[in-house]
Amino acid sequence: MEETSTVAASEDASTEAAANKSEQSLSFKEFLEGTHPSVFKPVHDLWEKKVRVHTEDERELTFSDIRLHCRICEGERTFRATRGSDEYRWSTRKVNLHPIYLCGDCQNETKYYALQVAFGDDGGSQVYKFGEIPAFGIPVSNRLLRLFGNEDASLFLKGRQCENLGYGVAAFAYYRRVVENHKNDLFNEIIKVCRTVGASAELINELEAAKREISFSKSIEKIKAGLPEGLLIDGHNPLNALHNALSVGLHNEADEDCLSDAQAVRLVLGELVDRIALLKQENRELTNAVQRLLAKKK
């Protein structure tokens, strides 16, 4: 009876492991777009079997189009491989690949990958990403870096580098340090926007009170009134989102969770700074338009 239970448990564990592996399998497109360097991932659609009559069968690797940030176009664009496919003899079990992708719009931005592929069955493979040029991920905007000044902008970029390499705890620690150092700069920018759009005196007073707190988390607790609608992200207050992430202790989280949190902090912070700049620009344009019309009346 005990032996039967052991065998059943082993089979259940094997089934669960196979299911987890299947769930984690990526398309080659997803792997190139979203996987950090120095990571192995199972990829399910990299190759197809090509039957040959007089020679050994081959695996044909197909490089599908991918979506990446183009520095020249300054936005997400479709990149296409400079070579559509590669073929390898069936007996080949492992190869190093260096696919090159070109922006389909400007035709000038090039993306280089260094990969290793271990062939499996039925189109499956284990793929390792040595690295890529330009570096993985969307570059940090100059607008966000200017908020931090030269010294802490360098720290933020170190955090971005750690994020690119998959070092979650380190990336999160860098981002949190920079946000703590520049919370008042962020609040000052929000206060300027609030005065521009005619936000309530209550909100402005709460933001001024938040600046007097030592930590970012304590500062956010002082802000009870809602931010102007133009600063909300998907209807939510981005300061609350940042507070939820930054108030978590690093030692209580797995590195993978810290990596996801670090990415979220960077994205929300960047979007908030972009929205602040947009509201300022819109108000400036509106002011100029009003002044122009008033000048015509005279």
Image (cartoon, grey):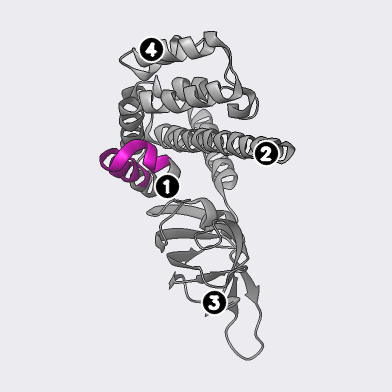
Distance from label 4 to label 1 (Cα)?
28 Å
Relative vertical location of residue 8 with respect to residue 167 in this rendering, above or below: above
Q: Which residue is mark 3?
A: 90
Secondary structure, mark 2, is helix
Residue at (60% x, 34% y) in the render: 283
Q: Which mark is first along the chain, 3 or 2?
A: 3
Nearest-to-viewer mark from 4 and 3: 4
Q: Amino acid at mark 2?
A: Ala
Q: Which mark is first along the chain, 1 or 4?
A: 1
**x then y, percent, for residue 252:** 36, 22
Q: Which residue is mark 4?
A: 218
Relative vertical location of residue 243 with respect to residue 134 in this rendering, above or below: above
**x then y, percent, for residue 215:** 33, 17
Q: Which mark is first along the chain, 3 or 4?
A: 3
Q: Name the residue furthest left.
A: 151
Secondary structure, mark 3, is loop
Q: Amino acid at mark 3?
A: Trp
Distance from label 2 to label 4 (Cα)?
48 Å
Residue 23 falls in image quadrant: top right
Camera-nearest residue between 205 and 254: 205
Res. 142 mark: 1
Examine the structure image and report whether residue 164 is included in the region drawn in magenta.
no
Q: Amino acid at mark 1?
A: Asn
**x then y, percent, for residue 219:** 40, 14
Q: Which residue is mark 2?
A: 295
Q: Quadrant of the C terminus?
A: top right
**x then y, percent, for residue 80:** 60, 69
